[in-house]
């Protein structure tokens, strides 16, 4: 049976450039067996032709309250449309439409249908990065989510404005995946507790200085968000960083030093099902933290460092049924060194980052990994955005026993 056989999907298309991708989505949904009806806002017609959508969906495409084609106009009943649908997918959802939906501003057929339907609504926002980051947009998205609407993630990359960043509509293939997993109900990580360490640790020298590293925490944060998307209950133990974590829906535990991260990781380890150590933990910490600021006149010539405790090693030592995954940052003989780390730390898998790959690792929005399993098999991936890498990693973890 096709994955969306006999599912009725009402597709709302608003006026953003990403609307040009909607014919591909309609094609994919049809191929998966769904019955599709499309509502367009009038500005969406500037980006995608109603005729294309009519041909692909094999249903009339609506955009006005009345049917313009006839001398004798007919009422396009938004209540009937809402009742017909199993789900209402709004993609792309522009900032303007999000605002109308959040504030019940009924200015077109699409919004009227949204306001009168009782079926689940999935929303795929699409806009420029500054618009997406604006507190007014964030507030509208939060409001819509509080009404029970499912807000799909946005993509990251090239934007029509010429800027690069977060805000674009996720690709039609990803929209299809989200629709299918919505209908499949239970998500792959439902009922599972996921513990993730992320970011750097800062080891204080005196009240104003520290020993640290360039980790941004982005990879760990993307892993945490992906785990939530897949239905997991997530605890993220995060070192100092400048990420915007305001909209994070998991349990955030902020730490500064390696020893604080150790305490939190170990005390949350036992109850966890899947544990991923993505943090760039400092391997050394100053032996003594000075309580007052070191002055120039002190002529500091050296700092005595002592090793920190290896958190991942300790988790491997006390591990019972937990699935334990680490990272390895290597510069030479990468695969063998990573395999060695996997063994020493008693891991189920290790994710290799090579320092020889460009645009990967600390500070970048992209990453290139090799996923190595306990049985020795290794699978290299292409350079991708860190959110796509997070999806690949969970895909491997979920299928680790196959
Ligand atoms: N790790 C940890 N605690 C530490 C050091 C590392 O939990 N004190 C974890 C990291 O989060 C990562 C893995 O161990 O998942 C490997 O980290 P990496 O820096 O590549 O290796 P190290 O074990 O620190 O060894 P080396 O730096 O000598 O390669």
Image: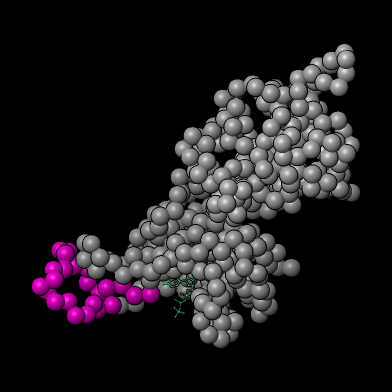
Q: Residue lying furthest top in this view?
A: 72
Instruction: Count the labels in the image.
Output: 0
Q: Nearer the viewer, residue 157 or 393?
A: 157
Q: Quarter-wise, where is residue 242 in the image?
A: bottom left
Q: Which residues are magenta?
A: 283-305
Q: Can residue 74 be seen in the rendering of this structure?
A: yes
Residue 6 lies, in percent from the top left, at: 87, 39
Residue 149 lies, in percent from the top left, at: 63, 34
- Left or right side of 299 for 72: right
**Residue drawn where x is 67% and y is 26% of the image:** 111
- Left or right side of 253 for 77: right
- Left or right side of 29 for 373: left
- Left or right side of 135 for 357: right
Residue 172 lies, in percent from the top left, at: 73, 49
Q: Is residue 112 magenta?
A: no
Q: Quarter-wise, where is residue 147 in the image?
A: top right
Quadrant position of the C terminus in the picture: bottom right
**Residue drawn where x is 61% and y is 48% of the image:** 160
Q: Nearer the viewer, residue 165 or 328?
A: 165
Q: How is the image coloured?
A: one colour
Determine whether 400 is above or below 41 in the image.
Answer: below
Q: Residue lying furthest left in this view?
A: 297
Q: Is residue 288 magenta?
A: yes
Q: Main secondary structure of the magenta part?
A: loop
**Residue drawn where x is 45% and y is 49% of the image:** 244
Residue 142 lies, in percent from the top left, at: 53, 36
Q: Can residue 267 be seen in the rendering of this structure?
A: no
Q: Quarter-wise, where is residue 56 in the image?
A: top right
Determine whether 280 is above or below 375 in the image.
Answer: above
Determine whether 126 is above or below 59 in the image.
Answer: below
């Amino acid at each position: 049976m096709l994955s969306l056989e006999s599912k009725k999907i009402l597709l709302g298309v608003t006026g953003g450039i990403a609307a040009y991708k909607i014919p591909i989505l309609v094609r994919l949904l049809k191929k998966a067996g769904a019955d599709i009806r499309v509502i367009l806002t009038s500005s969406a017609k500037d980006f995608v032709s109603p005729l294309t959508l009519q041909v692909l969906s094999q249903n009339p495409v609506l955009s006005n309250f009345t049917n313009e084609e006839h001398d004798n106009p007919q009422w396009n009943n938004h209540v009937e449309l809402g009742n017909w649908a199993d789900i209402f997918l709004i993609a792309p959802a522009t900032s303007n439409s999000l605002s109308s939906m959040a504030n019940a501003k009924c200015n077109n057929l699409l919004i009227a249908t949204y306001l009168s339907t009782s079926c689940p609504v999935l929303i795929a926002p699409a806009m420029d990065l500054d618009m997406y980051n604006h507190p007014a947009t964030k507030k509208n998205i939060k409001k819509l989510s509080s009404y029970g609407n499912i807000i799909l993630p946005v993509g990251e990359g090239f934007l029509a404005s010429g800027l690069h960043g977060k805000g674009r509509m996720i690709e039609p293939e990803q929209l299809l995946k989200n629709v299918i997993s919505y209908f499949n109900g239970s998500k792959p990580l439902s009922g599972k507790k996921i513990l993730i360490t992320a970011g750097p640790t800062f080891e204080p020298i005196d009240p104003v200085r520290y020993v640290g590293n360039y980790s941004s925490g982005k990879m760990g944060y993307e892993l945490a968000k992906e785990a939530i998307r897949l239905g997991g209950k997530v605890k993220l133990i995060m070192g100092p960083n400048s990420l915007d974590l305001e909209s994070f829906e998991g349990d955030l535990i902020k730490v500064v030093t390696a020893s604080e991260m150790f305490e939190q990781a170990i005390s949350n380890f036992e109850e966890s099902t899947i544990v991923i150590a993505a943090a760039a933990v400092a391997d050394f910490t100053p032996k003594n933290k000075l309580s007052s600021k070191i002055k120039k006149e002190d002529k500091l010539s050296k700092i005595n460092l002592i090793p920190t405790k290896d958190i991942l090693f300790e988790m491997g030592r006390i591990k019972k049924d937990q699935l334990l995954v680490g990272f390895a940052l290597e510069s030479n003989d990468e695969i063998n060194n990573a395999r060695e780390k996997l063994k020493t730390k008693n891991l189920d898998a290790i994710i290799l980052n090579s320092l020889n790959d460009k645009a990967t690792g600390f500070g970048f929005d992209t990453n290139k990994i090799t996923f190595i399993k306990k049985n020795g098999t290794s699978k290299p991936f292409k350079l991708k955005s860190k959110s796509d890498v997070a999806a690949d990693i969970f895909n491997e973890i979920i299928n680790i026993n196959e």
